[in-house]
Image (cartoon, rainbow, N blue to C red):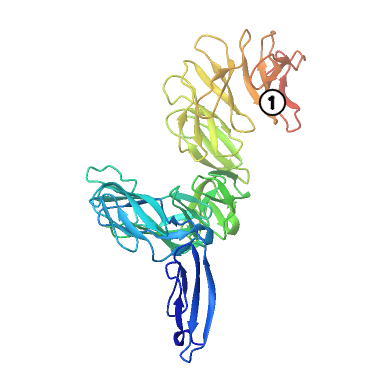
Amino acid sequence: MDPSRVAWTSLRPEVAAVDSAGLVVGVAPGRSIVQATTANGLMATAPIEVASADIALSETRVVVGPEESDTLFAMIPSQSGRAVHGGIQWQVQDTAVAGIGPTGIVTGRQPGQTELIATGFGQERRATVLVHREPQTLVVTPPASTPIQLPVKGVRRISAVAEAADSTPIPEVRVNWDVADTGLVAFDPVKGTITGKAQGRTTLTADIHGFDPVIWTIEVIPGTIGLEQSRLGLAVGSRDTLSAVLLDDAGKAIGRPPELEWASNHPDVARVSAGGVVDALKPGRATITATGSWGKADSADVLVTGDLLIASNRGGAFGIYQMRSAEPTAMLPVLSDSAPSVQPALSPDRTMIAFSSERAGAGYDLFLMDTDGRNLKRLTTNPGTEGEPAWSPDGRRLVFTGTPQEGLPQLFAINPDGSGLRQLTEGKGGSHSATISSDGRQVAFISSREGKPEVYVMPLDGGEARRLTRTGDKESQPRFLPDGSALITSGCIGQE
């Protein structure tokens, strides 16, 4: 039957009430009977038993600002948190701090703290009400004026802090955060961080009472582009590949990027094709750039050299030149000026040249430069002469000959950045003409410590030297072969 055509009555309304639609509400513990009566006198009854249930407040602490409101309600935890509508009386102890309406709406009046009391169904519950200071300014980081690019799995901190008139933070101010598309971005309000989940564009909004909402535009991108090599050395006619990775905000690799656009600023020197494949065409320097469709990019310098490095005085003073075996008449100057420069040694990665030069005006010192002559750097400043540089296979050490103004030549080691200078040999006869084995463990050199120039070998870091030759001839210019054996130049005593 239509409930509106039935008259509903509770025999004990102080225990259970019933409205015109037949909705029964428990008022107090006990028993009652509900009657349903039709217009023609038909009647039905239902026994009602109201059991006691603990009520709770939705919040035990309410924080609002002056003229700001929040709503409390009573609920029954044992009934899945069902809200209780009606039957609750609300009051606050200090009405100068906050007020409360009959439906549980709390309104802040002035800074301070008071207690809220809710009574009903024979129970009393209390909650703390804190009214914070009036905020005057809002400081947001980063500014919301420009979009934030966030890599997938990347994390960025975002904050919105309300400050009082004296510029001190008011941490109690409530900030309501909202992400427009939680499938793209996750926000942790406790840590104040956003995390990229999937590529796309969305917004993050911070809403604070008394201020216009702050809206950040979040662009979730695959990641920042990073090339695994910042410098690449190639011989003319050779080919290599630059590899790109995706990086998060901390610079940690998170995967491989989608298709990139590759470009060379000097394609006549080094040409780049899809996938970062670089072809070296002629000596020089080119910058290769990889750019993602989302705007992020990274670049690497490609240094292309010929087959040979030569010291020549064709320009007057000795300078350093490079040439190709296919074009022996074409010598390209790398460093040719009024300062003598000799004994060039190409680094294993073909990006740097170590050499000896008198350009400092105090004898020959050891210098370092890029293979195109840029980024010239002085490595040694000791009185005397330094020369005959030899690279370790990993490019991390240089062994050279140092000769003091008064004394015998000895071997030294130094790092390419100028640090770690160390003397490797000492004693009579001197030592010079170092060469380093392909495994980087040994140094072969010439020494006259036992009378005649002979070949000796010792660990790269120095130590006891072992004599290799006992021919009675004059030995010079040792060189290691890839298999570890050595070549030497030998001359009979008394001959040139």
The quarter of the rendered structure image containing the C terminus is top right
Residue 119: image quadrant is bottom left
Identity of the residue drawn at 31% across and 45% down: 170
Identity of the residue drawn at 49% across and 26% down: 379
> How many marks can you see?
1
**Looking at the image, can residue 221 be seen?**
no
**Looking at the image, can residue 426 be seen?**
yes
Residue 429: image quadrant is top right
Identity of the residue drawn at 51% across and 18% down: 385
Compare residues 453 and 349 and report the one nearer the observer.
Answer: 349
SS category of the residue bearing label 1: loop
User: Which percent across, then down, holds residue 191?
Assistant: 45, 47
User: Which percent across, then down, holds residue 355?
Assistant: 53, 29
User: Which percent across, then down, holds residue 280?
Assistant: 58, 50
Compare residues 111 and 129 and report the one nearer the observer.
Answer: 129
Q: Describe residue 141's horizontal placement relative to residue 238 as left or right.
A: left
Q: In this rendering, is residue 139 above or below 295?
A: above
Q: Describe residue 358's horizontal placement relative to residue 274 as left or right.
A: left
Q: Describe residue 364's horizontal placement relative to residue 429 as left or right.
A: left
Compare residues 75 and 465 and report the one nearer the observer.
Answer: 75
Dot 1 crowding, Cα within 10 Å, few <14, some 14–19, many 20+: few
Q: In this rendering, is residue 124 above or below 338?
A: below
Type of the residue with mark 1: Arg
Question: Which residue of the protein is positioned furthest toward the bottom in this rendering?
Answer: 40
Q: Describe residue 88's horizontal placement relative to residue 262 as left or right.
A: left
Say which residue label 1 marks. Answer: 441
Q: In this rendering, is residue 138 above or below 401?
A: below
User: Which percent across, then down, holds residue 367?
Assistant: 49, 28
Compare residues 252 and 330 and report the one nearer the observer.
Answer: 252
